[in-house]
């Protein structure tokens, strides 16, 4: 018979040998998921015996993780902005650095009401839904080309009780999209072909290529998105664009060529350039958003 304590020790040893970071934590999370209990229960009851079917299920999950499948896909969820989001292989795994866009959006939205939000390439819906959670009088639309990803986003909206204020539609970026939006957010693919070959195998082999890879220079998606922002942004509206990697240095020029103005260049907690705020014109409300400073890059 296998106890919780023995199981955790065995899984931790396998993960350490495979070079998986936070081996102990991941072992506890996988076991808690298998036993459908909180991780604290696993820690507090090392003497608990695992049923034979639980041992088999745990072994299957450990095998998937040793093959570098992201832990979030195995658990079927990931925390983002302190909210639990359902994820699967059709959606990117939400990452802490993307919360930089949420922080910037909430600063801009302070004191504004009845906002219309747009999330281009919504995936799991984590960006849009985190904002709607914080902005109770806002309404939002999430757009994605992958119908399976949209199914996950809709499920997350229902689970979080935000489906009344969140709508989703299938579209190729902003094609056939009309209307105007006060706040647009997007985390598009921006990995160049060269960077793709250097990605962690767990990302390259398991996360959706369509949501990551963006051509030779990493700018393919931006070239589709930026021209649409001019017609979709409401007066005094702002668009927050995630960026990173080699394409980050080229993006400002592309923004200006699209007839947009750079409002802010924001770094994430690791001091990497992560969020570019752009507008159709640097109006006074946008300048106030930055403390009357327009940051040019």
Image (cartoon, rainbow, N blue to C red):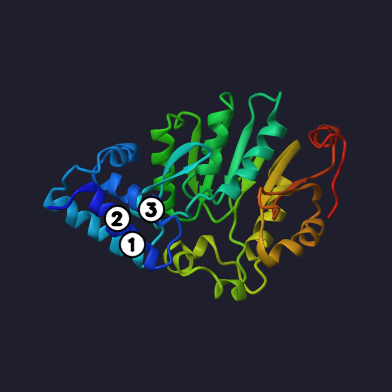
Question: In this view of the protein, can residue 95 be seen by the observer?
Answer: yes
Q: CA distance from mark 1 to mark 3?
A: 8 Å
Q: Secondary structure at mark 3?
A: helix
Quadrant housing the C terminus: bottom right
Residue at the spot of label 1? 13
Within 10 Å of disc 2 (Cα), the crowding (few <14, some 14-19, many 20+) is some
Quadrant hosting residue 205: bottom left
Give the number of marks.
Answer: 3
Within 10 Å of disc 3 (Cα), the crowding (few <14, some 14-19, many 20+) is some
Which sits earlier in the primary sequence, circle 3 or circle 2?
2
> Which one is in front, 48 or 115?
48
C-beta proximity under 8 Å, tags 1 and 2: yes
Residue at 67%, 49% in the rendered image? 268
Percent coordinates x, y for residue 84 in the rendering: 43, 39
Percent coordinates x, y for residue 48 in the rendering: 19, 42
State the mark number for residue 24: 3
Residue at 86%, 43% in the rendered image? 294
> Which one is in front, 124 or 229?
124
Left or right side of 105 for 53: left
Q: CA distance from mark 3 to mark 2?
A: 8 Å
Residue at 63%, 61% in the rendered image? 221
C-beta proximity under 8 Å, tags 1 and 3: no
Question: Is residue 278 positioned above or below 203 on the image?
Answer: above
Residue at the spot of label 2? 9
Which sits earlier in the primary sequence, circle 1 or circle 3?
1
Left or right side of 95 for 190: right
Residue at 25%, 49% in the rendered image? 5
Percent coordinates x, y for residue 101 in the rendering: 64, 44
């Amino acid at each position: 018979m296998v106890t919780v304590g023995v199981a955790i020790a065995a899984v931790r040893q396998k993960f350490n040998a495979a070079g998986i970071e936070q081996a102990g934590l991941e072992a506890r999370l996988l076991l808690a998921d298998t036993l459908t209990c909180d991780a604290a229960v696993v820690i507090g009851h090392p003497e608990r015996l695992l049923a034979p079917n639980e041992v088999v299920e745990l072994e299957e999950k450990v095998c998937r993780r040793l093959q570098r499948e992201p832990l979030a896909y195995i658990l079927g969820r990931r925390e983002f902005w302190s909210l639990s989001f359902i994820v699967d292989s059709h959606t990117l795994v939400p990452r802490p650095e993307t919360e930089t866009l949420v922080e910037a959006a909430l600063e801009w939205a302070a004191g504004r009401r009845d906002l219309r939000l747009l999330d281009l390439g919504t995936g799991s819906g984590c960006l849009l839904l985190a904002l709607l959670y914080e902005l109770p009088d806002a309404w939002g639309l999430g757009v994605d080309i992958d119908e399976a990803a949209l199914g996950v986003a809709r499920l997350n909206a229902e689970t979080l009780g935000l489906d009344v204020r969140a709508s989703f539609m299938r579209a190729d970026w902003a094609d056939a999209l009309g209307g105007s939006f006060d706040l647009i957010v997007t985390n598009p693919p921006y990995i160049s072909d060269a960077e793709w070959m250097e990605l962690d195998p767990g990302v390259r082999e398991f996360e959706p290529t369509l949501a990551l890879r963006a051509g030779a220079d990493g700018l393919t998606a931006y070239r589709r998105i930026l021209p649409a922002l001019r017609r979709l942004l409401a007066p005094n509206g702002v668009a927050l664009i995630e960026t990173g990697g080699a394409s980050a240095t080229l993006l400002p020029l592309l923004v200006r060529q699209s007839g947009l103005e750079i409002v802010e260049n924001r770094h994430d907690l690791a001091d990497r350039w992560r969020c570019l705020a752009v507008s159709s014109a640097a109006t006074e409300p946008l300048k106030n958003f930055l403390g009357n400073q327009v940051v040019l890059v």
